[in-house]
């Protein structure tokens, strides 16, 4: 049995067009979310590497699809952040098309991690991604990021609100509180990725 050591994850490549994807074998788990939802920070926390996925205080910095190698046949995919209001319209359309094309055509994609700032969950594009995951039968984990911004009690309240709203989609989802800063939810994230890897390996 392969033991996944996320600390040894390394950057593999970046692509700007779906047509540039040449790898169809193996297992990929994609991270997706609004700009500044904490995708890069989550990947860095998962791998215990501060600079693996570069992040910026400027939303919309991730403009490419970035691939990270965990093992020879297991990759983490960082999709462009969506919803950045200051990005030119054509650029936003390109990002959205890239995300849609990857999620609907990738043969290697076996799981999806949707990151939402706990303060502003379930925006319109988040709901689009959730619908797409159910339509295309992509297993999904929802991370409520930056939970350290709330008290423990308010975290629970927000968690229940999100859970109730998601019932209109399906009962087949899992929600996890997450904070890269306070190291909350990292163990649970690893557990879900390990489960997907073992299931499809």
Image (spheres, grey):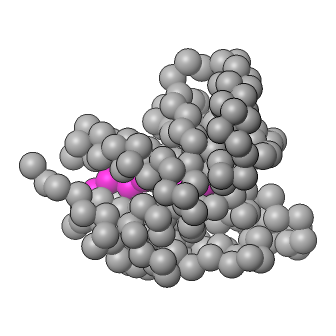
Magenta span: chief secondary structure: strand
Give the x, y percent position of residue 36: 72, 64
Residue 42 lies, with reference to residue 111, above or below; the image says below
Foreground residue, 188 or 108? 188
Measuring 40% from the left and 69% from the top, which residue is drawn there? Answer: 48
Q: In this view of the protein, which residue sits in the foreground, 190 or 113?
A: 190
Front residue of 112/16: it is: 112
Q: Residue at x 64, y 65 (%)?
A: 80
Q: Position of residue 70 (x, y in %)?
A: 30, 66
Q: Is residue 67 above or below residue 153?
A: below
Q: Residue furthest left?
A: 1
Read off the magenta span: 26-33
**Residue at image coords 51%, 23%:** 172
> Can residue 46 be seen from the camera position used here?
yes
Residue 82, picture quadrant: bottom right
Q: Is residue 50 left or right of residue 115?
A: left
Up/down of 47 relative to 14, above or below:
above
Image-quadrant location for residue 127: top right
Could you tell whether 51 is left or right of 92 in the image? left
Asked if residue 18 shows in the view, the reply is no
Residue 28 belongs to the span the image colors magenta = yes
């Amino acid at each position: 049995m392969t033991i996944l050591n996320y600390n040894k994850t390394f950057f593999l490549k970046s692509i700007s067009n779906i047509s540039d994807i040449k790898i169809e074998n193996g297992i990929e788990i994609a991270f997706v979310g609004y700009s500044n939802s904490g995708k890069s920070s989550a990947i860095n926390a998962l791998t215990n590497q501060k600079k693996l996925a570069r992040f910026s205080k400027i939303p919309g910095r991730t403009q490419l699809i970035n691939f990270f190698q965990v093992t020879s046949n297991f990759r983490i995919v960082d999709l462009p952040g969506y919803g950045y209001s200051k990005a030119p319209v054509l650029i936003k359309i390109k990002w959205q098309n890239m995300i849609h094309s990857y999620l609907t055509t990738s043969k290697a994609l076996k799981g999806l991690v949707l990151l939402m700032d706990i303060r502003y969950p379930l925006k319109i594009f988040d709901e689009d991604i959730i619908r797409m995951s159910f339509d295309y039968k992509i297993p999904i984990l929802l991370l409520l990021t930056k939970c350290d911004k709330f008290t423990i009690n308010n975290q629970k309240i927000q968690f229940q609100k999100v859970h109730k709203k998601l019932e209109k989609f399906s009962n087949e989802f899992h929600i996890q509180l997450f904070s890269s800063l306070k190291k909350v939810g990292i163990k649970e994230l690893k557990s879900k990725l390990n489960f997907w890897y073992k299931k499809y390996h």
